[in-house]
Amino acid sequence: RAQHSAAPSNKMASPTRALWLRLRNMPVLRMLQLEEAIFRTDTRSWFITNTWDAPPTSAGPERDAAHAAAQSVVLGISGKPAEMLNTEEVLKAGVPVIKRFSGGGTIISDADTLFATFICAAADEPQVPPYPDPILDWTSSVYDAALRGCGATNFAVRANDYCFATEEGDFKFGGNAQSISGKRWLHHTSLLWDYEPARMGLLRMPKRQPAYRAQRSHGSFVRGLSQTLPSRDAFCASLAAAAGATWELTPVELEEAQAALSLPHRQVTRLLRPEEVC
C-alpha cells in the first residue's frame, strides 16, 4: 500500500476540540481498560499518549527490570494465543498476555514501546467516514507530519502497518488497531522506539501475513524508530505538535479520564489466565 496523501482536517474557523491525556509509565492493561471505558462512555474526542521512562542503554539488571515492569503481549479481540504465540516460551518468561477490545494483530511491548491513541466523535471529523481505510488515511497523515518534523521523509503505510521505505525493503515500526461504532471511532498505535530481538521470538510466524513482509522473521522486518530518528523525546514532541496542528488539544489530568471507568460499559479488555494462554 502506498503512502497516503490525504491530509487531516485543519479547519481554521472551527477546529476539532479534543482532550489530551498524557500518561506516563501506565501498565498496558490499565491503559487499554481506560481507553475502552472512554471510547464506550464518553462523547468527546481524545488524544492519548503513554510513554515509559527510557530504560538504561547498557545491558544489565536495571535494564532488565525496566523492561519487565512494562512488558506485555497484547492480542486483538479475535486473536488466539495458540496461533499467535509460542505459548510455552511466553509462560516461561512470565510475560502477561492481554486480550484487548480492538481488532488488529498481536504486539509485544516493553519500556521501549510508545503508545498513541485517537478517539474521535464521528461528528467532529465528518469528512472521515467511520471505516478502517479512511481512518487509517487520516491518522497516517498525522504520523507523516510528525516524522517529517524529525527529518524522516520515507514514511509509508504497508498493509495497515507504519513503515520506513528503504532501498533494502520496507521496515515496520508501528502497528495499528481500531474499534468503530456508529458515532465514534478509535485508532491506537504501538510504536517501537527499540526492541529486544529475543522478545520478538515469543511471537509465532503468522499464517497470514502481508506481502511486503516477504516471509521475513520478526527481527528482519521490524526496525525501531531509534535507528532513524534523533531522539525519543524529539519524536514525542513532534507527534504532539502534529496532533495539535490537527486538533485543538486541551490537556487533562488522569482523574478526569478515570471517571469513565466507574460508568457502566461493556468490558472486553482483560488479562488472560495461564490456562487460557496454553
Image (cartoon, rainbow, N blue to C red):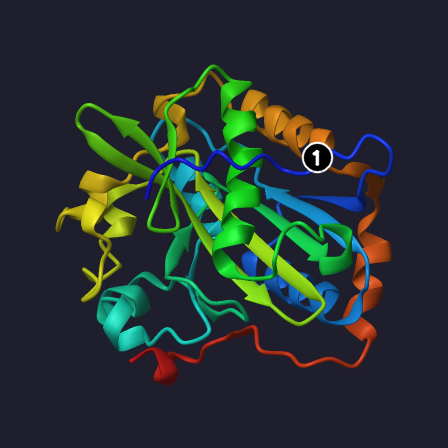
Which residue is painted at 37% across and 62% down in the image? Answer: 105
What kind of residue is marked 1?
Thr
> How far from the left and from the top, in percent, is residue 81?
32, 74
Residue 88 versus residue 139: which sits nearer the camera?
Answer: 139
Quadrant where the N terminus sits is top left
Position in image of residue 192 (x %, y %): 42, 39
Relative to the observer, which residue lies in front, 41 or 82?
41
| Pointer 1 residue | 246
- Left or right of 131? Residue 168 is left
Compared with residue 237, is residue 102 higher up or lower down, i.e. above or below? below
Question: Measuring 20% from the left and 47% from the top, which residue is drawn there?
Answer: 213
Residue at image coords 67%, 35% = 243
Q: If the image is split into quadrants, where does the C terminus sit?
A: bottom left
Q: 87 or 173, which is in the foreground?
A: 173
Is 86 on the left or on the right of 73, as rendered? Answer: left
Residue 136 position in % (x across, y down): 50, 49
Q: Left or right of 28: which side holds 87? A: left
Residue 66, percent from left and from top = 48, 42
